[in-house]
Image (tube, rainbow, N blue to C red):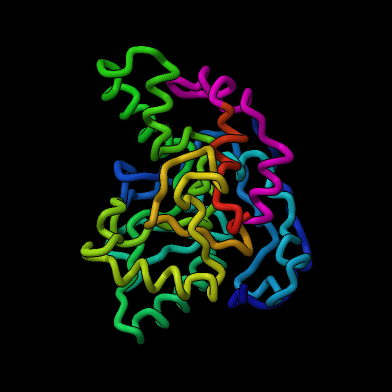
Amino acid sequence: MNYVVSRLPLFLFLVLPLAGCGPEAEVGVHFSRLSGQGQQETPSGLSADSIPPTDSALLRAVPDAGLNYLMGKFAPATHPDFLPVGSPYTRKTGMLLRRETLEAFKKMWAAAKKDGIDLFIISSTRTFAQQKGIWEGKWTRFAADYPQAEDRARKILEYSAMPGASRHHWGTDIDLNDLNNPSFEPGGRFENVYRWLKAHASEYGFCQPYSPKGKERPNGYNEEKWHWSYLPVATPLLQQYRRHIHDDMITGFSGAATAPALHIVDHYALGINPKCE
């Protein structure tokens, strides 16, 4: 897999620790400065040119981001490693991404455009608070049909992450063009988009983390053909998440008590396409 990136980070900063995806995820959310959470924004150590090409060991050399970052408890709008997406890469306002993700996407966007493929971002970075809004909206909406807490949580988890367990927290993951699988399947309006992404996204460092469920991916969210992750940053962050985050840390929202029983970390946060690890 060839990543369009260059140079190893020279320094690291730690974030002081504190302890959505899917068809109904929000799009085009305005990101606010989440003041009042007592968290100081500090760089993670990466820049747009920070990772060498092809060297898998160096691709994993991302400094420890800290618990706040891994769980989305920080303000992307004030974080120095995040940039606004803007036109023509999105048709929505308020989108933010890590600068490495955005630079890689711009290259992929331009290549797709040359091939007659129109890519546009419809959802990008989401904070813990924003994911909580999505989750609790569904928690209320599904209450009548799924009165038992674990059943209701499983229903929501078909496509939406619990707050603190979403890859969208990291600024590495994007939703493209539509939030429904049929749109990307034969006869769908974005069939050619998905065919192009399957053939070329890896050339720019992107991978589809939620592939079809089966032997290779028995657990986790349902397939999401629209969700793509920038691996040069997401892979080391996933490794940090695996080391530092546990089910009992997933708290602070309705239904959070179900996280341990549902194995949120192992089955959902880590339950991705093996090719994207």
Q: Is the magenta stretch mostly helix, strand or loop?
A: helix
Q: In this view, does 98 lie to the left or right of 239?
A: left
The x, y position of residue 166, in whole percent, is 51, 42
Screen quadrant of the N terminus:
bottom right
Q: What residue is rendered at 49% in x and 68% in y? A: 102
Residue 211: where, in percent of width, then height?
47, 52
Towards the viewer: 120 or 218:
218
Residue nearest the viewer, comparing 136 with 202: 202
Q: Name which quarter of the figure residue 188 lies in.
A: bottom left
Q: Quadrant of residue 215?
A: top right
Give 201 or 35, whichever is nearer the viewer. Answer: 201
Q: Give the image location of residue 249, x and y in percent.
A: 62, 27
- Could you tell me which residue is drawn at 63 percent across and 54 percent down? 277
- Name the residue at 44% across, 46% down: 126
Q: What is the count of numbered marks?
A: 0
**243 inside magenta stretch:** yes
* Above or below for 143 versus 31: above
In this picture, residue 193 sits left or right of residue 149: left
Q: Give the range drawn in magenta.
A: 235-262
Query: Residue most toward the bottom?
Result: 114
- Measured as percent of width and height from the top left, residue 210 is found at 47, 50
Q: Is residue 144 above or below residue 20?
A: above
Name the residue at the top extreme: 148
Which residue shows up at 55% across the image and 52% down it? 273
Q: In this view, does 144 lie above or below 51?
A: above
Please tell me whether residue 193 belongs to the stretch shown in magenta. no
Q: Tell me if 153 is positioned left or right of 237 in this view.
A: left
Camera-side residue of 15 and 184: 184
